Every structure is written in C-alpha cells, then in structure tokens.
Image (spheres, rainbow, N blue to C red):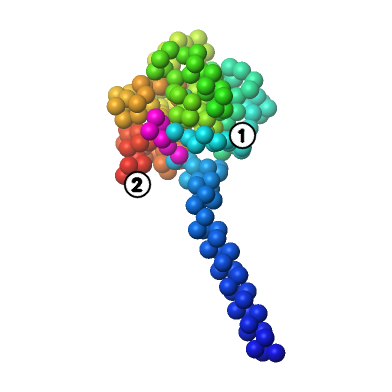
Amino acid sequence: MKRFIHIVGLLLVLCVAAVFFMRYADPERDSSASFTNSPSEELLLVNADNPLPQDYRHENLINLYDQKNKHFQLAKADIEVCEAVYQAMDAMFAAAQKDGVKGFIITSGYRSREEQKEVFSTSADGISAKPGESEHETGLAFDVTAYGNENFELTPQFQWLSKHCAEYGFIIRYPKDKEDVTGVPFEPWHYRYVGTPHAKEIMDEGITLEEYLERQ
Ligand SMILES: [Zn+2]
C-alpha cells in the first residue's frame, strides 16, 4: 500500500511538471501574454520600427461618455481608453481643476486598426501614423485640446499638463526636438500612459520612450 502511494505521488509530481513545462515552453502563449492589460504593457513600444501585430485587439476598454466625467469634456461620444488610463485621466484632470485649470477637451482615444486606416487615408502625408504604428491602437494614449485655442502648446492647459502629467503616469510621447528619435514631430496634445514611476523618470530627464527602453 505504501509503495502504491509513493507511485501515485510520483506520477502526480510528473504531471504537474509536464503542465508547467508546456505552459512556459509555448512561445505563442508567451507572445500573447505580453498584450494583456499587464504592467509590461504599460511600456509597450509602438512606432514605425515596432508595429503592433496584425491581429492586435484591445479588450479592456471603457467609453468615456458613459463615465459622465466632470473634469474634462469630450469632442465626441465614442471615445474609449483602457480602464487604467481612464482612472489616471480622472485623477489628473481633477487635480488640474483644483488648480483652477479647466476647459480640457479630449479629442481622441482608442482607435481600431480600421479607424486608424481611415485616419491615415484622410490625412496629409506624414501627419498621421500608418495603421499598426499608432499608439491610439493600444488604448493607452489620448489627444487633448483646450476651449478656444488653435495652438495647444501656448495654453495654460498645456503648461499644467507638461508640469504634472508624469505624476499621473502620462508622458508627452512626442516631445519637441526629438523627431530624430521618435520619427514624429512635436505633439503637445498627445499623452501616453506608461505608469507613474516610468513617466516621472522619462519626463524628469526629458527623454523619449525609445531612449528610456534602450537603457532598461
Ligand atoms: Zn494622438
């Protein structure tokens, strides 16, 4: 009997070991795991050299209109972002309002591959990212503007965001004079969520996500 229990025990250990091996040795499972809403996704790099996979889809999205948020306005009713990004936006724009800086209008969030195709096909050459190369397809970025201002860079809203966005996990993804690194001209209106510790380091040092990831 004792011997029988030993054999069953040994078989159980072997089964568990086999399951673990199959789980972690499967390369497909590993690559898909990096596209869930995990901390590693916060640092997901999307640019012309690093396009998103053809079948990339984000699932954990929420509609901003449904949130009835009082700290920012919306340019349209169908803007979505990842849930973690919404929480960070809510805290950030509430803090801005507390500081007397209001009038933010969110103009864009998540875009599906099809929507990015549409944006790309209707914009002038070089102004919009190609489908698969836009951060908007991740749900981790949003565009913002301010009431009554053509040039967002000159607004108090931009001044506030550039000073405080990192405290809430956001970076100015395409800073001034960094086009040679990012491949994109200065975009004062585009904010990308990377999480607070990363954002603080990136913004404090005035570097790009590309430069930050290079030294990890
Ligand atoms: Zn944008």
- Of the numbered discs 1 and 2, the one sitting upstream in the chain is 1
Q: Hey, what amino acid is under mark 1?
A: Leu
Q: How many labels does the image show?
A: 2
Please report the bounds of the magenta region as a residue range.
Answer: 44-50
Please determine whether, in this image, residue 17 is positioned above or below residue 185: below
Magenta region includes residue 13: no
Label 1 secondary element: strand
Question: Residue at image x 62%, y 76%?
Answer: 11
Question: Residue at image x 54%, y 36%?
Answer: 56
Residue 118 visible in the current orientation: yes
Q: In which quarter of the image is the N terminus?
A: bottom right
Please determine whether, in this image, residue 62 is positioned above or below residue 6: above
- SS majority, magenta: loop
User: Percent from the top left, x then y, of residue 55?
Assistant: 55, 36
User: Percent from the top left, x then y, of residue 42?
Assistant: 48, 41
Do callouts 1 and 2 mark residues in contact (Cβ within 8 Å)? Answer: no
Question: Residue at image x 55%, y 43%?
Answer: 37
Residue of label 1: 61
Residue of label 2: 216
